[in-house]
Each structure stands twice: as C-alpha cells, then as structure tokens.
Amino acid sequence: MSQDQAETPTQAAQAPFERRLAAAAERLMAVLTREAELLKDLRARELNALLPDKREATLAYRGLLGELAETPGLLDGLAAHQKAELKATAGRLAAVTEANARALTAGMDANQRLVKAIAQAVRQEHGPAESYRANGRLATGYGAGAAPAVSFNQVL
C-alpha cells in the first residue's frame, strides 16, 4: 500500500491477526533500531522525543501477544510459509531487542563514567569545602572540610 493509500486505524484493526502481529513487530523493530542509533550518536533530545513512540509500539506488540496467549488458535489456519515468516520476524525482533539492550547498557555505563569523572574533577578542582555557621564564622569540626555538595541529574 502506498503512502497515499495508507490504512486507517479501523482498516488496520480489521486486518488478519498475523498481519497485525507482523506489522506491530516491524514497527517496534524500527523504533528500537532508531533508539540504538540515537544512543550511539548521543542525541538525548531525540531519544526523549522517541520515548512515546517506543511505549506505544511496545504496548501494541505486547497487546497482540496477550491476545495470542488468550486465544492460542489464532494462528492455526496459517499456511506453513506464513508461520515461517512470523517466526523469522520474531527472530529478527529478538535480535533487535538484544542489540537495543546492549546499546542502552553501553549508554548508561558511559553516562555513569561521565558523571563519576565530573564529580572527581569537581573534587580535585575545589578541594575540601569550607562552610560557615549561622553567625558567619568559619565552621570547624563536623562538616568542615567536606567536599562541596554536587548533584547530577542522571536521566538517560
């Protein structure tokens, strides 16, 4: 179907189950692949913008899997080649999901290393902090000489 003849949501919902399942898997793979590319390129804003699409694609696919679990006979009438196509799609989705998980883990690890490096640089640059009491005098004892308070937003 061309873009000019795109399916309406009603037409898509009326499509055979196996076609809806394959389309949902393809859509989820596209979103996960895009996410991995954005992670690799460190494009955080675009990653955040992709989250609603990822959630929607994941929920759609999961919903169809739930429907299949509730009605196991949904795929019984398929020809052998159709079943093979669905299995191949599921295999590709598993591979894309694993690659996406590796990219997410690598991104989180890199982010954590960056946060630690920044914190270390702040500690080295500023040394121990001196604090003041309410009366304006330099504090000694508990809390005196403590590292400066630093907070990081660790959103990836």
Image (cartoon, helix red, strand yellow):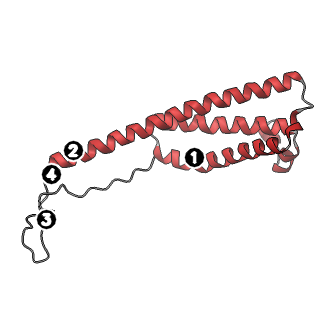
Mark 4 or 3, nearer chain start: 4
Q: How many circles with numbers are drawn on the protein?
A: 4
Front tag of 1 and 2: 2
Foreground residue, 91 or 19? Answer: 91
Q: CA distance from mark 1 to mark 2?
A: 32 Å
Q: Please indicate whether residue 100 sits to the left or right of residue 58 in the image.
A: left
Instruction: Provide the residue designation for mark 4.
Output: 126
Q: CA distance from mark 3 to mark 1?
A: 44 Å
Mark number displayed over residue 76: none
Q: CA distance from mark 4 to mark 2?
A: 8 Å
Q: Helix, strand, or loop for circle 1? A: helix
For disc 4, the neighbor class at 10 Å (few under 14, some 14 to 19, many from 20) is few
Q: Please indicate whether residue 61 sits to the left or right of residue 48 in the image.
A: right
Instruction: Provide the residue designation for mark 2.
Output: 121
Task: Specify the quadrant of the image occupied by residue 14.
Answer: top right
Mark number displayed over residue 50: 1
Mark 1 or 2, nearer chain start: 1
The amino acid at mark 2 is Ala
Instruction: Provide the residue designation for mark 3.
Output: 131
Q: CA distance from mark 4 to mark 3?
A: 13 Å
Name the residue rendered at 43%, 40% in the picture: 108
Front tag of 3 and 1: 3
For disc 1, the neighbor class at 10 Å (few under 14, some 14 to 19, many from 20) is some
Mark 4 or 1, nearer chain start: 1
Q: CA distance from mark 4 to mark 1?
A: 38 Å
Whether residues under marks 1 and 2 lie with C-beta atoms below 8 angstroms apart, the answer is: no
Position of residue 124 measured from the top left corner of the image (x, y, whole percent): 16, 45
